[in-house]
Image (cartoon, rainbow, N blue to C red):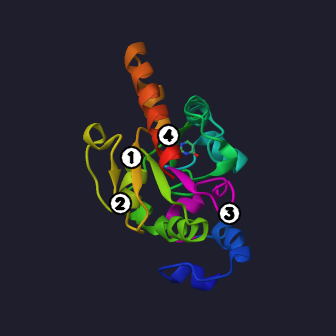
Amino acid sequence: QEAAERGTHWDGPSEGFAAALAGCQRCHLCHHATQVVPGIGPEAADLMIVGEQPGDREDLEGVPFVGPAGQVLTQAMATAGVSREGVYMTNAVKHYKHIVRGKRRIHQSPNRDEIQHCQFWLDAEVGRVKPKMIVALGATAALSLTGRNGPMKTRRGTVEPGRLGVPVLITYHPAYVLRLRDQAAQDAARAALSADLATAWKQQ
Ligand code: URA
């Protein structure tokens, strides 16, 4: 456990992984979230999908992609013919970053430091699952997996070399899709998300 807190990469056995992750205090986010939200899916999946961080619902349930954005993703995967059972799904950051306003908990994007601290866990998951391709949902996942920032407008739908030697297909975050108020724009973004998922599914 202590080594997990200090080290730069996970070198413990896979049975200890969940417990070590649950006790993570590598950054301050653990003090605000309800619980850590680990990845979900088969230990050896050819395709990995990486989001930003758990949302409100995920924080309460301890499972990724169960809230509104997760529903958009689930729908896009179904349209793309991607089987959930064949995919390992996780997040770049494992604790919910938010601020409290009255009764509401408002999402805040993780910063570079928080993303970097959590790479310890993401890298361990990639090392364990050994996917052939990774889909990065949005800018945070793209930054964490490629080490590069850049406008989603030009990066979306492209495959970039990953920091860990696994190619990364960059696409929209489902929460971004939900935020689009114009129906035509939202439909187009949904279609782009499922087209990218279908491409990744075929290539893996
Ligand atoms: N958004 C994410 O990026 N991940 C989740 O698990 C839920 C919402």
Where is residue 42? Give x, y as percent.
69, 57
- Looking at the image, residue 149 sits to the left or right of residue 197; the answer is left
Q: Residue at x 64, y 82 (%)?
A: 12
Q: Earlier in the sequence, mark 2 or mark 3?
A: 3
- Label located before the other in sequence (1 or 4): 1
In the image, is residue 45 part of the stretch drawn in magenta? yes
The residue under label 4 is 197
Q: CA distance from mark 1 to mark 4?
A: 10 Å
Q: Are marks 1 and 4 in contact (CB under 8 Å)?
A: no
Depicted 168 relative to depicted 58: above or below: below
Q: Residue furthest top?
A: 183
Q: Is 15 placed left or right of 164 in the picture?
A: right
**Rendered residue at 45%/26% (across/down):** 191
Secondary structure mostly seen in magenta is loop
Q: Which residue is mark 3?
A: 43
Marks 1 and 4: which is nearer the front?
4
The amino acid beneath tag 1 is Ile
Q: CA distance from mark 1 to mark 3?
A: 23 Å
Disc on res. 170: 1
Q: Residue at x 66, y 43 (%)?
A: 84
Q: Which residue is mark 2?
A: 146
User: Range of the magenta residues?
Assistant: 25-50
Q: Position of residue 30 (x, y in %)?
A: 58, 61
Disc nearer the start of the sequence (4/3):
3
Where is 90 relative to 22, above or below?
Answer: above
Q: Which of disc 3 and disc 1 is earlier in sequence? A: 3
C-alpha distance separating marks 4 and 2 = 18 Å
Task: Identify the amino acid type marked 4.
Answer: Leu
